[in-house]
Image (spheres, grey):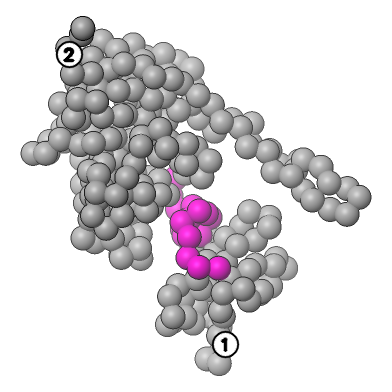
Amino acid sequence: MAILSLLSANGSAGIYDPDSRKIELNGKKIDTPPSFILEPGDMIRIKGEDFVATAFTTLRIGETVKRRTQIIQPWDAAYSMKMLALKPGMRVLESGGGSGAMSSHILEAIGKTGSLITVEESSANCESLVSLRAFLGKQENWTITNSRIEDFRWEEKFDAAMLDLPEPWQAAETIKELLKPGAMLCTYLPTFNQVERTHIALSRSGFYVVECSELIRRRILVRDGATRPDNDIIGHTAFLSFFVRCSGLRY
């Protein structure tokens, strides 16, 4: 049997590995009895919380595996991938891989024929990414490089890029050289000042600014006679900026 995802209505998530008979929640493994078998659609209660078993999904991968850093939330990731126009077979550059949540979403979008190159400056984060790569079985089309993006070089140009870095403006010229003309770039930044510096630097380096957006997600608690918004609402995650690498020609 394939690995299953365990999803909770409260937003929690985990996985069940039928081969090892182990459940994993927030990076911690839980043993189950030898006779225990969990199948899609089954319900299980863990530490007072109900979960339903489904086919494996990366939707809540950040809540599933042990992580060292904050992650790009699923709603930000989904919009980013749509704007980047990710498709099977594309070659994608990512810098600032962190715990790999965004990496897992990109890999799903580009499929087995695509390739993802993740440039990560932190050696500790690289170790986490390598572990996630093994877990996802993506050794063939996911390259992880321990380097600063400013020092990174690659023979072939990229179709799209995702930067989750605190100072992406420092890599403006490097990214320009790495992307194909017409390729889309996304930056993920938490503050207005970072956004301003990035927009100015990339514009000067020959990028066209498409938009800057902020996405707010509000969960609704549906209860008999008491349906209302959840009290735990994330008011701000980050600002998503999108740029196109211009060819230099103007008509």
Residue type indicated by callout 1: Phe
Query: Can you identify the residue that label 2 sits on?
Result: 248
Above/below status of 153 relative to 14: above
**Crowd tier of the residue under label 2, counting other residues whose Cα lies within 10 Å: few below 14, some 14–19, many 20 or above:** few
Q: Main secondary structure of the magenta part?
A: loop
Q: Which mark is residue 236?
A: none
Q: Which residues are magenta?
A: 54-70
Which mark is first along the chain, 2 or 1? Answer: 1
Q: Is residue 30 left or right of residue 52?
A: left
Above/below status of 218 relative to 2: above
Query: Can you identify the residue that label 1 sits on?
Result: 36
Q: What residue is rendered at 40% in x and 49% in y?
A: 105
Residue 177 position, x and y percent, is 15, 26
Q: What residue is rendered at 23% in x and 18% in y?
A: 246
- As for residue 67 lying within the magenta part, the answer is yes
Residue farthest toward the left in the current orientation of the protein: 155
Residue 212 position, x and y percent, is 46, 21
Q: What residue is rendered at 45% in x and 53% in y?
A: 67
Q: Report the Cα–Cα distance between label 1 and label 2.
A: 62 Å
Q: Nearer the viewer, residue 147 or 132?
A: 132
Provide the secondary structure element on which disc 1 rests: loop
Provide the secondary structure element on which disc 2 rests: loop
Q: Nearer the viewer, residue 82 or 13?
A: 82
Determine if residue 65 is in view.
yes
- Residue 157, by quadrant, is top left
Residue farthest toward the front in the current orientation of the protein: 251
